[in-house]
Amino acid sequence: MSRIQTTFDALKAKGRKALIPFVTAGYPYADVTPELMHGMVAGGADVIELGVPFSDPSADGPVIQKAGDKALAFGIGLVQVLDMVRTFRQTNTTTPVVLMGYANPVERYDQKHAKPGVASAFVQDAAAAGVDGVLIVDYPPEECEAFAAELRAHGMDLIFLLAPTSTEARMQQVARVASGYVYYVSLKGVTGSGALDTGAVQAALPTIRRHIDTPVGVGFGIRDAATARAIAEVADAVVIGSRIIQLLEDQPRGKVAATAQNFLQEIRSALDR
């Protein structure tokens, strides 16, 4: 059983919903991420999504794109992201960590770090670093069965996005390979765009659950405690990214972790009311 499944099972037993913050690795300072991750856990995070910086992020809005550009300018790539997870794991062995990003860095990593007899150096190294799940935005489910099986063999989950435009046939394809949780994109567009329609989310969830047994997290557009609580009424998890990135943008290094912690405490309190 993966750490992600263990976490969701424990939350369900207590009647609680998962809080999943997203931050871009290496932002807003190259060396702050492990400390920031610990701050988010102290604020009530149940799972952490760690964005892998990439130069052409098709699903990311301007806020996360800007964060990724800054991290790339610091020289942050997948090697450094795995190092950050290793550092975090030195003192936290329970909070699941999901890497969210794109195919190019993963496939380039496999090219550069290929090992004899190893199908994917990325999978092996991610598992060794303490990663629990992978969400690769541009990996379609019909192309991922072997990759999903290899991740599961190393105790990791493959997580997929679903959108308001996803057909029931697509949901069935995702159900065959997804584990851990699925991430429902609550609106059409990129991260941080548009106004969240909680009624539309509520209407979509029953259809998703007819086809998918794993927990459903909802993100893209959740910015405050009230919206998070409304989403938690129907979803298994609330994912917040762009708003955290905005809050961290102008913080001095010494206040980054505390800023994220304080914000998440407000969200956690609202979810638990």
Image (cartoon, rainbow, N blue to C red):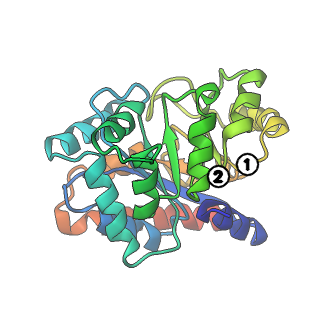
Please give the name of the residue rendered at 56% of the width and 39% of the height, measured from the top-left corner.
147
Q: Is residue 1 above or below residue 213?
A: below
Q: Quadrant of the N terminus?
A: bottom right
Q: Residue furthest front?
A: 116
Residue 104: x and y, percent? 36, 31
Query: Which of the pair 121/41 is nearer the observer?
Result: 121
78 horizontally vs 254: left or right:
right
Q: Residue furthest bottom?
A: 91
Q: Residue furthest right?
A: 210
Q: Circle 2 sits on which residue?
A: 180
Q: Is residue 82 above or below residue 105?
A: below
The local secondary structure at tag 2 comes to loop
55 horizontally vs 260: left or right:
left
Residue 86: name its quadrant: bottom left
On the question of residue 218 being in view, the answer is no
**Amino acid found under the numbered disc labelled 1:** Thr
Query: Which of the pair 251/191 is nearer the observer?
Result: 191
**Residue 214 image label:** 1
Residue 205: name its quadrant: top right
Q: Marks 2 and 1, how far apart in space? A: 6 Å
Residue 111: x and y, percent? 32, 36
Please give the name of the residue rendered at 60% of the width and 37% of the height, measured from the top-left corner.
146
104 horizontally vs 131: left or right:
left
Estimate how packed mark 2 is, as few (under 14), some (14 to 19) or many (20 or more) residues with alpha carbons within 10 Å.
many
Residue 186: x and y, percent? 60, 34
Q: Quadrant of the C terminus?
A: bottom right
**Residue 170 image label:** none
Q: Mark 2 vs mark 1: which is more N-terminal?
A: 2
Q: Are marks 2 and 1 in contact (CB under 8 Å)?
A: yes
Residue 214: x and y, percent? 73, 48
**Amino acid found under the numbered disc labelled 2:** Gly
Please give the name of the residue rendered at 74% of the width and 47% of the height, measured from the top-left corner.
234
